[in-house]
Amino acid sequence: MTMSILNIVGAKIWGGGEQYVYDMCEELTSRNIPNYVLIDETNTSLQDRFSAVASVITGGLYTSKGLTSAFTISRKMKKLGVTVIHCHSGKYILLAILLKKLTGAKLLFFKHNVIPAKTDFYHTWILKQIDACICVSKLVYDLQQVSAYQNKFHLVYNGINPRRFTSIVNNRNKHEFFVIGYAGRIIRNKGIEELIKSIQALHYQYPSIQLKLVGHGEDAEVKWLQSFIESQDLSDYVHYEGFQQNMNTFYESIDVFVLPSKVKEAFGLVLCEAMYCHIPVITTDSGAQREIVEHNVSGIIVPKLTVPLLSKAIEDIYKDSNKREQLASKGYEVVNQQFTVATTVDRLLSIIRNV
């Protein structure tokens, strides 16, 4: 039977989860496996972005219309021959289950967040309906175990698409300034304020240190960030450059990447991207980052997010070029061997064939 996959993407803005699906779709297409992405009918930005790697189907995901349009979506799925559904958010699992019932497709539920499994009637019922639950890190996997359905849980690490970064790997440039980079959602629980304050503290002693931040955010969070930079008079060396569609430009421009999350990261795809680009990374011990980064071997892990600890980690790596090179080299090696999208897709296809 020919395999054909539909990914349900309900996010409103671009983040690591969306990049993960994008790279997966591109890998599936390269293997001649038909794949589709279901996106809200009003989100033309995501529609345009995903159309480069997959066929786009639209529906009313942001309102109750999503469930009522399930019959229309299911007819499209049958016409296209979709045999597998990937659901990437609990918000859309009821829609996914309904589409499974209407089409007979297999259903994989991806867990991209660090939340302990719930065993009430509703969540147990969901586990009965799905064919497999994909956990993107061991941290997520360990939290999701429900003994009665243990065989449905699978650990499948996220992976990056190396083809996106070939030019950077081969052409790392030296910069006039020493640029610290952050890429991700613009939201305070990602530790952005502590990162800016760390750069502020270091800049007086090391004027060449600058900070570049890129990423999407809700209007209120972006306004907070811009206001904070202006009110602290940091605009000469702290730069927010908005959403970057081509991340090559960003990675080419930075010397160190920092992911200073306060929240528990379910994985940390952006760390893998930076490491693959031979950029030394600094992150916190707040989630699954330790599954990617080995402290002082393939990156730096700050045990707790405080301005003094983060400043010290940045200062140490700034002053030691040999350490930067060693961390960058080992980081690339780890990602190239363990965290590529080809490995991810191999594992997913094996699971699909056996459920």
Image (cartoon, rainbow, N blue to C red):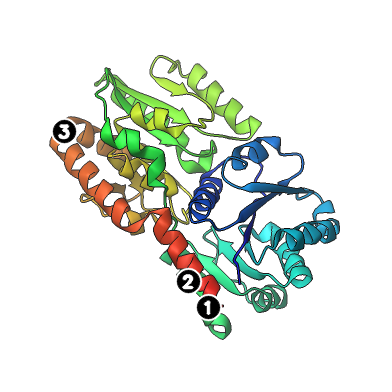
What's the distance in space between the residues labelled 3 and 2, CA to CA? 43 Å
Q: Which residue bears the numbered disc 2? A: 350
Residue 244 higher or lower than 268, as above or below? above
- Point out the image quarter for the N terminus: bottom right
**In the image shown, does 68 or 150 lie closer to the viewer?**
68
Q: Is residue 62 above or below residue 125?
A: above
Query: Which residue, given by chain and number where applicable, does mark 3 sit on?
Result: 321
Name the spot of residue 10 as percent of width and height, x first.
Answer: 67, 50
Q: Percent x, y for residue 205?
A: 24, 21
Q: Residues within 10 Å of mark 2 (few under 14, many from 20)?
A: few
> Gap in Å between the C-alphas at discs 2 and 1?
6 Å
At label 3, which amino acid type do we have?
Ser
- Give yes or no for contact between labels 2 and 1 (Cβ–Cβ under 8 Å): yes
Q: CA distance from mark 3 to mark 1?
A: 48 Å
Displayed quadrant of residue 270 = top left
Q: How dense is the environment of label 3, judged by Cα within 10 Å: few (below 14), some, or many (20 and up)?
A: few
* 78 vs 185: above or below: below
Q: Sequence-wise, which precedes: disc 3 or disc 2? A: 3
Residue 354's disc number? 1
